[in-house]
Amino acid sequence: MAGTGKQAYILFYGITMSAILGALLGGFYVLQSWLIEVIWPGPTFRPLFNAVWLLIVGVLIYSAQRIFGGPMPKSFGLIRADLKDHGWSDYRYVLVQMVLPAIILTSGTSLGPEATLVSSTVLYGLWLTDKVRYVEQNYAVLRGKSWLAQLRVLVMPNKFLVRRPPSVKNKSLWTPWTIIWFAVGVMFFCLVFNLGGEPSMIIRVGQSNWQLQELWWFLPLMVLGVALGQVYLKLMVELRKVILGRVRRNWQLVLLGGLAIYAASLLAPGIMFSGQHNFHLLAGLWQQKDVGFLLLRSVLKLGLLTICLNTGWLGGDIFPVLFAATAQGIALSHLVPQLDPVFVIGVFAISMGATILESPVVAGSLMIIMFLPVNLAGVGIAATLLLMMMDQLHGRVVCRYGSQFTELDLSSLG
């Protein structure tokens, strides 16, 4: 019976903390969205204000790098490297790495909140498992204390922890309990998201009336999307090399990123912020734009994305890449008017986005769930599965957050 009581105690503690952590992550999303609306309530062509605000955020980014010894938020790629080498990653500043990015995203950096959400979720998960490990090992002593003393131990963030030993670094973090805790965290994230009055993240790019004969274009559209995705990925990698090869100091990198964002705010505001934040443009106004406009905005979006990722103006690249791929899909649909436009957009955007992100699952699932009409779900799933098979046939190690242009350790620069 004692064992049962111990298991119930730990399970209840894990569920309670998961609910709190999920609510914190939801609060981060609501906060960054609210701050963007406060800072950018209307027209973006405000030369003086934009310059002053970017200067403030740039100083904050540089100061954070100096104080915390690296970029904030800590990228998932660096967390994966820590887990591989040591079985553990430093989560002491996880709360800070949610507040800082919420402010950074108000700059208009061509990135989204997903990087912070993913890395913070993992760090919170590591913290919770270290807490649970302590409770398991000290359960008898802990239960002998008063409820107030127990509560102090259970909620103290940087004490009463037992770090994951390096001997189990190759062991999966997923267990039946961590799966339950993750699900609870997602539920409370969604609860705070809805209570915060956030608009739905599902934005359909249009209605599709595709016909069976259009399947003849399925493979050509995929091949074109993959080919262009590879070209853009190589160009983005080369741009990254140019930036890091010629700009060696942190403050110079931050300045370069700020100047790029400033230029975008005045000349092409549609490429600012997360792709998801501006996806309504692709579902409405931009579908009437000409091919040149769409191609230029797509290329500029990828360019600004790459500059921001490698100059300290950090964030997530998933939605920006899907935004750029969808814009090019719209442009392509104008060139083949005999085909259903949303069919063209869906197949092409999944293929191009999956290639740049190096993950068919991420690109395909998000496009299907959030942006394509329901009657294109089967086509989207087929494209995603085929892209996954292509990856396996070519022997590629697909690692979404191991992308060649997303990993930058600014602490190594002078």
Image (tube, helix red, strand yellow):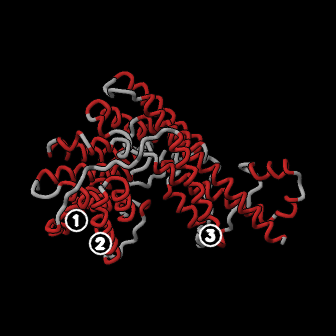
Disc nearer the start of the sequence (3/1): 3
SS assignment at label 2: helix
x and y percent of residue 70 in the render?
A: 53, 47
Q: Is residue 246 visible?
A: no
Structural crowding at the residue carrying mark 1, measured as other residues with C-alpha within 10 Å and reported as few (<14), some (14–19) or many (≥20): many
Structural crowding at the residue carrying mark 3, measured as other residues with C-alpha within 10 Å and reported as few (<14), some (14–19) or many (≥20): few
- The residue that label 1 is drawn on is 222
Q: Residue at (64%, 49%) from the top-left corner?
A: 20
- The residue that label 2 is drawn on is 386
Q: Say which of marks 3 and 2 sits in front.
A: 3
> Is the N terminus in the top left, top right, bottom left or bottom right quadrant?
bottom right
Q: Are the residues at dot 1 and dot 2 in contact (C-beta closer than 8 Å)?
A: yes
x and y percent of residue 393 in the render?
A: 31, 78
Disc nearer the start of the sequence (3/2): 3
- The residue that label 3 is drawn on is 176
Q: CA gap, disc 3 to disc 1?
A: 38 Å
x and y percent of residue 53 in the render?
A: 43, 27
SS assignment at label 1: helix
Q: CA gap, disc 3 to disc 2?
A: 31 Å
Q: Say which of marks 3 and 1 sits in front.
A: 3
Amino acid type assigned to the residue bearing label 3 in the image: Pro
Judging depth in this view, the residue of 398 and 135 nearest the camera is: 135
